[in-house]
Image: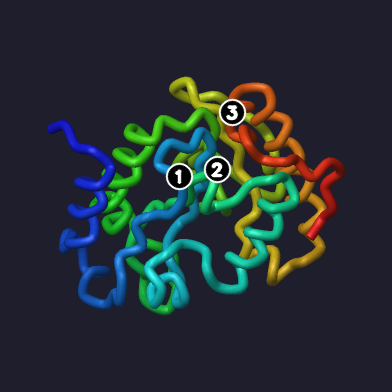
Amino acid sequence: MSMNYEELRSLCLHCQKCKLAETRTNVVFGVGDPNAKVMFIGEGPGENEDLQGEPFVGRGGQLLDKFLAAVDLDRKKNIYIGNMVKCRPPKNRDPEPGEVAECIGYLNKQIELIQPKIIVCLGRIASCYMINPTFKVTKEHGQWTQKNGIWMMGTFHPAALLRNPNNKPLCFEDMLSLRDKIMEVCPETYAGIELLGLPQMP
């Protein structure tokens, strides 16, 4: 069935497919430019995201925004951010396989409609699903692979960086690599944006 972005969003906001629908405050569909060429994918909403209906808005999200700004990216202008599951798992536990199975169709359809050229996976769970089931963030972060014509990279989840700030320089290196990849495959991402020049680590 053919479906546009707004139709998919409306369908997702009313979803009752799994038990997460019973405990959510808001469905967290995604945020950003639906025509973006760069897409970020996390595992699922936390408490702040559930309350506000937007991905990555808590302390981790604020840190993510700083990393994005360092390489001239902005969730309101030139990227898109989504999650594997659209409702918060209770107590921020990992989403269960059945919950992912029921929800992942929304993400797959988002990718189909947005048609990104680059996907950055935030954290182990998203990286394992999108890139490789055995993905190890500490060992494989920043490594590029191409699947179905899309360049993909896994990096640290912002919440993990809050717990272990020593990994911030590694994540910053990944962001610099992302900037280079954008300039290589989709420089239009930076159209109309005054580039900051030499990036500074948040």
Task: Tell me, for residue 188, which label it has, or none.
Answer: 3
* Mark 1 nearby-residue class (10 Å; few <14, some 14–19, many ≥20): some
**Does the rendering let one see residue 40?**
yes
Dot 2 amino acid type: Asn
Residue at screen point 50% across, 26% down: 150
Q: Which residue is mark 2?
A: 78
Given residues 197 and 55, the one toward you in this image is 197
Tag 3 near tag 1, CB within 8 Å: no
Q: Which residue is mark 1?
A: 33
Report, in whole angstroms, how far the alpha carbon at label 1 lies from the one at label 2: 6 Å
Q: Quadrant of the image for the C terminus? A: bottom right
- Extreme residue in the left direction: 1
Percent position of residue 180, x then y: 73, 31
Q: Image check: 163 left or right of 124?
A: right
Q: Image check: 6 left or right of 85?
A: left
* Mark 2 nearby-residue class (10 Å; few <14, some 14–19, many ≥20): many
Dot 3 amino acid type: Glu
Given residues 99 and 171, the one toward you in this image is 171
Report, in whole angstroms, how far the alpha carbon at label 3 lies from the one at label 2: 9 Å
**Does the rendering let one see residue 127?**
no
